[in-house]
Image (spheres, helix red, strand yellow):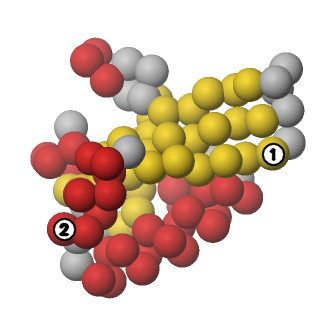
Amino acid sequence: MRKTVQRTKGFEKAFLKLQKKWRAKFIKQLELFLDDEFHPLLKTHELKGDRKGEWSFSVANDIRAIYRKEIVNGRTTIIFTFIDIGSHSTVY
């Protein structure tokens, strides 16, 4: 199965506002995420309410990455679109 990562402009802006150590940690966690979206260390979960259809995983401490996923081409490709990143209180 092929996995593709996209980032929205909103994600890019939020990412650049993070401290350098959290940006580096996101990149490391992204590698783990692409290997296993539901690895226990990531605490991946689907969101509810206004954010229904979006997912979140833990980057570190209080930092969360929010994304959408789309399965295309008869389940041969998954597109992960990252839409936000930041502290729990910022992204929720």
Picture quadrant where residue 47 is located = top left
**How packed is label 2: few (under 14 Cα within 10 Å), some, or many (20 or more)?**
few
Amino acid marked by disc 2: Lys
Q: Is residue 74 above or below residue 63?
A: above
Picture coordinates of residue 17, whole percent (x, y): 19, 68
Residue closer to the observer: 2 or 41: 2
Question: Going by the image, does 7 lie left or right of 37?
Answer: left
Picture coordinates of residue 28, whole percent (x, y): 54, 74
Q: Secondary structure at mark 2?
A: helix
- Which disc number belongs to residue 2? 1
Disc 2 designates what residue? 17
Question: Going by the image, does 45 lie left or right of 70?
Answer: left
Question: N-terminal of the two: label 1 or label 2?
Answer: 1
Residue sitting farthest toward the front: 9
Please tell me which residue is depicted at 45% across the width and 21% down the height of the picture.
Answer: 53
- Using the numbered discs, state the Cα–Cα distance from disc 1 to disc 2 in whole angstroms: 30 Å
Picture quadrant where residue 41 is located = bottom right
Amino acid marked by disc 1: Arg
Residue sitting farthest toward the bottom: 21
Please tell me which residue is depicted at 85% across the width and 20% down the height of the picture.
Answer: 74
Residue closer to the observer: 50 or 12: 12
Q: Is residue 68 above or below residue 18?
A: above
Picture coordinates of residue 70, whole percent (x, y): 62, 27
Question: Going by the image, does 40 lie left or right of 47?
Answer: right
